[in-house]
Image (cartoon, coloured by chain):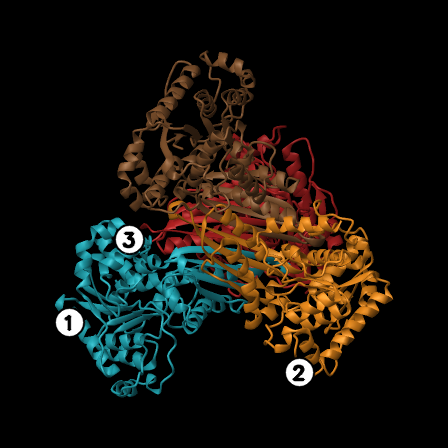
Chain colours: A orange, B brown, C cyan, D red
Amino acid sequence: MRTGVWLVGARGSVAVTSIVGAAAVRAGLSEPIGCVTEHPDLRSAALPGFADLVFGGHDIATTGLLKRAEALAAAGVVPGRLVAALHSELSTVDEELRPLPLAATQGEVAAAIAGDLVAFRERHGLDRVVVVNVASTEAAPAPHPAHAALGALRDALQTHEVVLPPSALAAYAAFTAGCAYVDFTPSTGARLPALHELAVERRVPYAGHDGKTGETLLKSVLAPMFAMRRLQVRSWSGVNLLGGGDGATLSDPAANAAKSASKQRVLGETLGYVPDGHTRIEYVPDIGDFKTAWDLITFAGFLGTPMRMEFTWHGCDSALAAPLVLDLARLAAAADAAGRVGPLPELAFFFKDPLGDVDHGLAAQFEALSAFVASLR
Amino acid sequence: MRTGVWLVGARGSVAVTSIVGAAAVRAGLSEPIGCVTEHPDLRSAALPGFADLVFGGHDIATTGLLKRAEALAAAGVVPGRLVAALHSELSTVDEELRPLPLAATQGEVAAAIAGDLVAFRERHGLDRVVVVNVASTEAAPAPHPAHAALGALRDALQTHEVVLPPSALAAYAAFTAGCAYVDFTPSTGARLPALHELAVERRVPYAGHDGKTGETLLKSVLAPMFAMRRLQVRSWSGVNLLGGGDGATLSDPAANAAKSASKQRVLGETLGYVPDGHTRIEYVPDIGDFKTAWDLITFAGFLGTPMRMEFTWHGCDSALAAPLVLDLARLAAAADAAGRVGPLPELAFFFKDPLGDVDHGLAAQFEALSAFVASLR
Amino acid sequence: MRTGVWLVGARGSVAVTSIVGAAAVRAGLSEPIGCVTEHPDLRSAALPGFADLVFGGHDIATTGLLKRAEALAAAGVVPGRLVAALHSELSTVDEELRPLPLAATQGEVAAAIAGDLVAFRERHGLDRVVVVNVASTEAAPAPHPAHAALGALRDALQTHEVVLPPSALAAYAAFTAGCAYVDFTPSTGARLPALHELAVERRVPYAGHDGKTGETLLKSVLAPMFAMRRLQVRSWSGVNLLGGGDGATLSDPAANAAKSASKQRVLGETLGYVPDGHTRIEYVPDIGDFKTAWDLITFAGFLGTPMRMEFTWHGCDSALAAPLVLDLARLAAAADAAGRVGPLPELAFFFKDPLGDVDHGLAAQFEALSAFVASLR
Amino acid sequence: MRTGVWLVGARGSVAVTSIVGAAAVRAGLSEPIGCVTEHPDLRSAALPGFADLVFGGHDIATTGLLKRAEALAAAGVVPGRLVAALHSELSTVDEELRPLPLAATQGEVAAAIAGDLVAFRERHGLDRVVVVNVASTEAAPAPHPAHAALGALRDALQTHEVVLPPSALAAYAAFTAGCAYVDFTPSTGARLPALHELAVERRVPYAGHDGKTGETLLKSVLAPMFAMRRLQVRSWSGVNLLGGGDGATLSDPAANAAKSASKQRVLGETLGYVPDGHTRIEYVPDIGDFKTAWDLITFAGFLGTPMRMEFTWHGCDSALAAPLVLDLARLAAAADAAGRVGPLPELAFFFKDPLGDVDHGLAAQFEALSAFVASLR
């Protein structure tokens, strides 16, 4: 089952780490550490193998893939020896990366993107292509009446107005080309009624939002723990210090607000109430690609006795995200092959802000994921 | 369903906090925070209510219950206003606390304990009594041939030899009196073939070992998180600083070793491999009843990228343990009422070192517990 | 040497803790823990004793002192037994607390404040009075031409304009009444050329700004450590979670900005360069009077090797501030007695944002303080 | 002033990092970050320059210096590009490294070592040689009567008995050859009356013990902070997780005990009392060369209010130690040139367990160091 993985933001850190990693695993140079689909409970012949994945993508940046990979090696995100050993594989992928098309109307841009997707699929004789958005987080877009229905959207895209943010335009193009779409970012993506209509019309699945890589991953196991133990969480405050490209983007208050809200959602959903405190994102350039998150949780035990816990998480976001990107591409491709259409709430395990009315506890999400994979066999 | 709760170590911090708390909840002065059996998924008419619980117990110490409660209030473990409001309730319980019987042979001691249990049951017209061991941790006992079979054990207990450690002698007496037995400590308790034989003969259930109150509780959600995410835990090191009575006991290397081993067990069972590092217990008198645990976890992500997390847990052990003691008493009583005999592996949720070949992930344990409670209806 | 201590914000947490503490020390019920002037190197007959201090003050709040003290006891800031034992002493002080005067012009308000100060001094036959500002942090005031010179200020105060923020008006009144003035907050206080002129005219000393109680105290020893060791600090980021009255005030962005800038000043001054990162203050009501600060410092060692340290400080701000308030009152009184006029840069040890061009390392500041005390003998 | 630096343990991590670093600084490839002698207050023409240092040494290991440097680069201790650029410099030094001499008596071994030192000095036309011990920590040796006096020691060394531990034998040989001796480890080194006698006889200086690289460095600024602020430290507990060669050595209880005692000494000396708690060293292989130390400090503020702080230090011991080794070599050489004889207590700044009755606060030690350097001019 030859599967295309088309990355939006293909020269960004997450995308490049995914590409390097997939090549390394395929070449037997590295184990697929961090790949959830390699868990014994999830391994399945219904999923395309690492060797079946073909990479392509769009980016507004033009720096060569090799140069980006070397920069990541210098920053400690990927091992330099792997980059050195995979020169020719990376050059081959680099040829499949395209600048984001430009045109007079968003409709024309979408058509050009869809054209790139179809050409990619045909050029490589792929069974299907999954589009994965790993571009920088966008600010929340202004509402627009054309978001509500596909017909109105098609009309609006023919005007010179900016109707859709880039992530949603990518979803529009993906669906148009008959491709599944996964949004790994907190951006809008496919979360508009008009786009849902299009996905259903083209009979493709989609998934999102906002990959759960660090602090929220911990919240998704710690909050259920407090809930199961009937301990009262009084406050939960967090700060994320990060220095990579995403850090600079998120220091923009609008993007920060979107991301922070998405990070606290798990608490209300899991505890059944919202404790004091909030999550803050700070851009500290020297921190680089390794993010440090610190959380303080105050809680009451029996008879109201006050207690507290703190944690520090020091992780490399790109290295945490990349294996999940590969997982999501494999799972979305298998869902597409199995005829699944529309949102995939069973993939909530991967996301901070999952689609659908789902359980936010990680263990329950893992069970849902296992059942989903079993259903694809 | 009037239920006796007979506490071994009845004047210790955990026991006194349990007694004060049960009285406070019954009097409507406090919410049952931290009581797992009050979780919406677990509430059941099959369990005795807080108002149905009658307390008694043994202790080698003789300090009055009120005085012990006031000391806990001064240390911030229970609110002083509750102790002040519950004077008469605590005096009533104090009359039910007995010195641990003394006699020439362990058989005679066991008979005297069993006699106290039966008298307690009859005096209060109780449907049943659950014995809960919350005494200080014992050193691991020397093996003895009489541990292997009930007949041999009965004979050996008639000699002047010390055959059983105190926790096991309490289990022997409990079973003899037809009472369920719960061990909240890492001591031997009912974990001997001869005692299992006796529990089956008397048709009573038992549960244990070692209440999961702090660091191990966190391990039981964090280790499954790493496992589900296929992140490779390279090392997991922890230190527990504690100053209460248990701290002094555990500074004894033999007891420390037993406890530390019990604390690391969850890692091997959940991850499928044992990472570097170990857990250390340190006695620091000034820390008092509030324990501070610090853990460092180093792990590898995609392509081997090294990452790390730390946590600090600052909890009051007695206040964390007490609601679980009440939960366990209620659950063991209901199991006994339902005719359950022998070990109760479904109560693994509560223990660091649970009986039976059970899942060590907290979420799976909660599910098993829910199913167990449902089965009692 | 009978000395009046006139507290601006006399019913706030810091003031009440200072009053309770001074009474407890005088009554022999508590040791003067945290009082720097009791250090063997600083003890001096030139300083008024605890028994020589008489308290009074202004506040816009009217809650009784006893009630405020009991609230602090309930929050764990002061021991309840002390409050109970000091009822009559606290009632006596309560009679010396006045509502802040109201009048048509700021000049009239200042005259009324000065009148209260003079009456307090005469009523108790005091040798001198020190005014200490422990009111809530103000937002930075708009610049005003009358701040530059005393004549212009006197004229402007006769108009109906708001010329001075409350802290500066208090300094104006203090100087007018011939009293020394200490500002324990980051507010304007005496830091205006016109007020300096007045202090010199009335021949009184003043000191400030912003008591160094927690995170900045640590910075003042850690930053010099990095500097002495020639380690390159790359980033220093901090977050302060606090829930007391000051927390609510500081959640106002203007006050927050003033405070945060004052907190980072020590880094530039001590290291000789300003690293990445900044300090954030968050209001989390459940945290209460105990503040938790977390700082992450990344630094480079030999050959640029990246390293890091983190600290968490969990302190009670009022209990940290109160002994320093007593120290400052004693020191300012002694300086006044010794004829010192104008700013007292030798008291930099106590402040985040000290007056004058002083060393920001704590050890150097302690030496300067010792020399100052010795000079008063 | 051409100065030889003879490293005992010359192929260990600290030594190799020192050699690589000195070469890198000399070649202009790196700044001397972490070198205290480059502090503006300490720079002095009395000290030999980096270009004046010539390296040699003994080791029982025989792995090539280049290979060791490459292993350190792979572990992130030194930058790989520096090792690559310094191949020829490292080969040159490698030729000066000797296996530790073997002989029938310790006297003969000492004579062989001294011979190596003299030959090294003459071969390179050096003005003087400083011997620096950076070998693994030894267990404390058994007392021996010959330690007390030089005559007895000389006699005992002619026997087949083991009289001196290796660090002390190295000091004996150094003094015999007229070389200054610095002990960067907690081992015995020159701390024996007989060796002091020899140093005085040969008119050379010596310094030690146990380089202050991490946790103790922090203690030396934090403990004075608590002391200056008159805050009562109730407990100070620490754990050091380390995985390098020294970690394996220190997991030996005897060596651990020596090191831990040396780590707590600063507390008693600085605070004037010894708080609860102790420091533990744990060997965790996966941690590698980067050590993580965690400390919990509980303290009482005004009126006894309990507070706490924690810190985590994540540093690379070799990269922290190496610049100090260069500093000490430069300073000991200058002291020798200036005619200083016997212990150098002014170098206490560098050591956990300094010689002489010195102040343990870092700021006071820095002042003493500055005065010392000034006196050499």
Q: Tell me which amino acid carries mark 2.
A: Glu
Q: Which mark is residue A161?
A: 2
Q: Is residue B92 left or right of residue C247?
A: left
Q: Chain of mark 1?
A: C
Residue B94 lies, in percent from the top left, at: 30, 31
Residue C306 lies, in percent from the top left, at: 61, 58
Q: Is residue B95 left or right of residue A162?
A: left
Say which of D339 and A217 sits in front.
Answer: A217
Q: Is residue A347 above or below residue B144?
A: below
Q: Which mark is residue A60?
A: none
Q: Which mark is residue C32?
A: 3
The residue located at (60%, 70%) in the rendering is A248
Q: Tell me which amino acid carries mark 1.
A: Ala
Q: Chain of mark 2?
A: A
- What SS does tag 3 mark? loop
Q: CA distance from mark 1 to mark 2?
A: 74 Å
Looking at the rendered image, the disc whose residue lies closer to the viewer, 1 or 2, is 2
The residue singled out by tag 1 in the image is C119
Q: Chain of mark 3?
A: C
Q: Is residue B302 above or below residue A131?
A: above
